[in-house]
Image (tube, coloured by chain):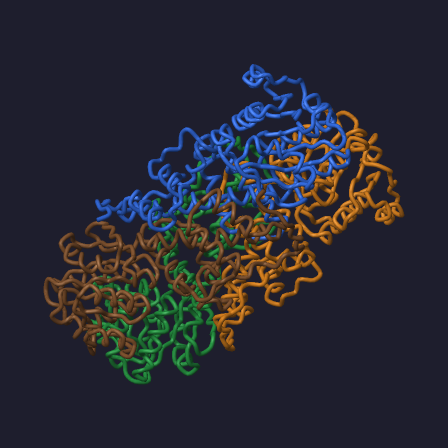
Chain colours: A green, B orange, C brown, D blue
């Protein structure tokens, strides 16, 4: 396929690399042009604007940092991709963005008889490089079918959620919500354990080994126990954004989400403590009120 | 070993059965004597009071419903086990009770030169019958050593947390806390998914299959998706009690636990809705505010 | 003064009426032109667009329903007031809008060498008709001075908060926050009182008579006790908006505001219950979990 | 009246002083006997035990620090007041204690054909000295009538809440709840104001002057603005206790109280920061997350 590609961050580069691996022809644009050099060396054509990158291609893929960046690149009045894309062709947004932005993108592309697919992904850049993302896709069935080669290049599995592109984003935001809730819950649990004299690694052994048996609990649990928040797999500042987008999605359905509200407050506290560039699991250690009577931690372990 | 046994509930009967399986001699007491008939048929001696059950044994095991029941059976001024137990012998409390009660038990047994071990367990009665509980134990090392045959009879693994008996209970309460947080989080997530037009079973497929890969998420997730809360594996009313005991443990360390506070409020809401005898995963469905604009749920699935 | 006026809601009409009372010359615009008839009868000129209303006047006053309405009327690319306003003249925004909108308004007016003043007001339309609003104003000192005749027409007092227009809005949002917190707190208190068998009007008597001695507590307290939420002094839907804007203001300072988060969840619950057009004090009665054991309410009273 | 008096704290001494002023005959007991010297000088008889203080009197008044202290003094197996009080006589508990304790006191006194009245009071020791407390009383009507001379000595008004003594305590706990909610709300509001560049005293001026017009808002607002938390009018540690008792009262009715849960967490944070002896308004300043970008605070004020 001829593919326009918008974005040059870590995730974007990994996805673009996979598309080249699979033999697609790439027309890439990024606000900071230099970042695209590795793609150019592998044969991608570097373009001057989103509109140019979208001209004549079968699909434009965007993987940008936030709602504003996607809106500008796609809908910018001067040089947005929407101005270049041919009728009937698809814009596939793979960023984790909010429902209002998705709705606006869908509406404006439709007004030009273009198609819009939302396909946020699950997984880190390293997984993307290996083509092992999980793709969450929603949009008109034939548009999703047209994007299948793209999804196959980057993902090990694709889940489809029907016509309405927003639904893919709801799912992505909810997955991040459940993860963030785990982080905060472990933070509260480990802190109480330690203040009560229990080693948090022993608690984690049981939590994971005997209760959840989940590689996700194990991986994040160890990060938190060891306070190993650098390098960030997922920036805490992105977590703040995702919690906000989730709360907006809840507000659109008039649904109170008290755990999400707790997460919001904790992420803000972590931001105020200067942790924005740390891994988002650092929320589990956002300075909690100091112990008034630190307990002596005893040894122990499995017998 | 000669073992006094206090309790006749489902968990108590399963544990007592294992002790008989392992050849221990049992002197059993329960407030409702009839419940002990199955033990008597297998050779246990049914006693008239906790004090009698404790006389001349190596250890007294208690598995009773709550703090009050344990306090009365162990410390009752008329016929508590403490009156019968010999100096140097052990009271092993296996119930999930609060730290203040544990502290009081430890203090009063010590005052009579008896030993106290707290050893709450992880697992359902069915697991107990198979000897597959996880035992969380704390107390003086030699007292724990003396109880090893008991722990071996009921558990597949034992974790030790040092001298202070309270620590075993902190761990047990924290495990239940992390589970309860998962229940509430899934409840919020599934509700928003459905209101946004996403089938909650599809969300669960991804949550478990691609993210957590945890049998615990899968099992509880399906209960919640199907609203299958009967029979109760763990009564919601017991969940209320455990959240309260956890909050007390947090208060003792002056530690705010906002997720635990959210759980408290949700469990109370569920109680008010008459769900006390349902499985505690029913908190995930405690009637949330009704949808103002129910979305049409679309088909979808993995491709 | 020659004043352009944007808006035709209840509050807008009351303010515009005051400006006419004080002898100002009004050039009024509203999206629904008919609503302005009463002003036209009193001598105001009805204009076709915000841009026209802003032409040649000393100041444009806007009193519109929300951030979008203000943004469009002020900055609309086709006919926004910004296109008509002369250099050096002032746009006075009196709506309760968010900080980001205020910032954008300030930036864009400044870029055209116009001035921007934010001056949200405190009080109901009835107070506005009597010129008894409280004006919260921020902007450059000389722009504030230029607006003094406007503020005098509508308000009994004006408070100034310095150069940065956003600050007036922070103050307005905070005042509404403290009021909304009172509503939720009274709701929780009255509900527990009644379930415990205490008449909520007796509780209110003491709360107001012996503790707060505040006409605000008395007025809202009686609305809640009597469940008298119609007609709405302030629509619940506007309360939702203001809580959202407040949380955004908190997020901009990385400040967790747990009470505001509780309010958000309660207002959403009330929206889901269909109370959007009721007085915002109805949040105090958003259906709470039903009583499991309603207490008999006893008589009582002051002796 | 012949009155037994249990307690020697600041509030107890003030109340006892008033009873002497009104010509009652006092038989006083306190755990620390020395504290009663000022009463003895004024003619009170100092007794050796609560039981002795209760012998032969018309009523026993208790004003002690917490549930434990009241339970021990009233019901102590060795020398509790219950052992000395004659049949038909009254125990009037004026402490702010929890519903379970009140229920137990009522039950045990009734079992001995004694009467129990709960009559917590509103006001500081200074108000007590002037006889200006507000008395919240519940119990059997004839018992309340019998206590009228006591209430008249200490209070400027008495409110009766029917037969069930617990109701007086619910009211007292709710009044403290509404006050504590005000403290936390002001804390959140002032913090956001300051971070946004608004002087909190200017915000308070409007909050109180134009909105609430309440001496309570003014008094506490100024304490918080000035961070004037010493001397404590009401110890923060007592606030922790009262929030806990309130949450227990809510739990007894299966009523979620999310604002009370927020208060619990904030009070614990304040305790962890070592503020237990400060005025409870210090919760409003329990170290919040530090500002990431402190705004320059501008001048301003009313014009």
The x, y position of residue B289, in whole percent, is 53, 64
Looking at the rendering, in which quadrant would you find the N terminus of chain A?
Answer: bottom left
Left or right side of B1 for A257: left
What residue is drawn where x is 40% and y is 61%? C239
Q: Looking at the image, can residue A178 be seen?
A: no
| Horizontal arrangement in the rendering, residue C216 relative to residue A68 (left or right) | right
C297 w.r.t. B68: above or below: below
Vertical position of residue C190 compared to residue A161: above or below: above
**Viewer-closest of A18 and C302:** C302
Which image quarter holds the C terminus of chain A? top right
Up the image or down, B93 lies above or below C236; here it is above
Residue A265 x, y percent position in the rendering: 41, 51
Front residue (pair A93, C248): C248
Up-down relation of residue D61 to residue A3 (above or below): above
Number of numbered tags placed on the structure image: 0
Residue A279 percent location from the top left of the image: 39, 51
Residue C67 occupies which quadrant of the picture? bottom left
The one nearer the camera, B273 or D229, is D229
Name which residue lies at 24% across and 73% down.
Answer: C39
Q: Can the viewer see residue A121 in this picture?
A: yes
Q: Say whether residue A195 is left or right of residue A33.
A: right
| Residue at (87, 47) in percent of width and height | B42
Q: Which residue is more in the foreground, D234 or B109?
A: D234
Residue D6 x/y as whole percent:
62, 25
């Amino acid at each position: 396929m001829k593919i326009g590609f918008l974005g040059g961050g870590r995730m974007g580069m990994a996805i673009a690399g996979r598309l080249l691996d699979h033999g697609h022809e790439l027309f890439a644009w990024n606000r900071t042009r230099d970042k695209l050099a590795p793609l150019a060396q592998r044969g991608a054509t570097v373009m001057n604007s989103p509109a140019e990158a979208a001209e004549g291609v079968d699909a434009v893929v965007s993987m940008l940092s936030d709602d504003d960046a996607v809106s500008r690149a796609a809908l910018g009045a001067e040089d947005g991709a929407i101005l270049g894309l041919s009728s009937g062709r698809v814009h596939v947004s793979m960023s984790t963005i909010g429902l209002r932005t998705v709705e606006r993108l869908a509406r404006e592309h439709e007004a030009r008889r273009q198609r819009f697919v939302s396909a946020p992904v699950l997984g880190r850049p390293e997984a993307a490089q290996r083509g092992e993302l999980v793709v969450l896709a929603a949009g008109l069935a034939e548009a999703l079918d047209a994007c299948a080669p793209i999804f196959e290049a980057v993902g090990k599995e694709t889940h489809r959620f029907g016509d309405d592109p927003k639904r893919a984003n709801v799912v992505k935001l909810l997955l991040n919500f459940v993860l963030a809730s785990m982080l905060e819950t472990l933070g509260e649990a480990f802190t109480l354990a330690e203040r009560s004299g229990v080693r948090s690694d022993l608690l984690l052994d049981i939590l994971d080994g005997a209760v959840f048996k989940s590689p996700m609990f194990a991986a994040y649990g160890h990060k938190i126990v060891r306070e190993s928040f650098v390098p960030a797999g997922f920036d805490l500042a992105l977590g703040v954004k995702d919690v906000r987008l989730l709360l907006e999605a809840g507000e659109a359905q008039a649904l109170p989400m008290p755990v999400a509200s707790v997460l919001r407050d904790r992420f803000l506290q972590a931001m105020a403590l200067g942790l924005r560039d740390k891994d988002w699991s650092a929320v589990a250690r956002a300075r909690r009120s100091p112990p008034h009577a630190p307990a002596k931690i005893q040894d122990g372990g499995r017998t």
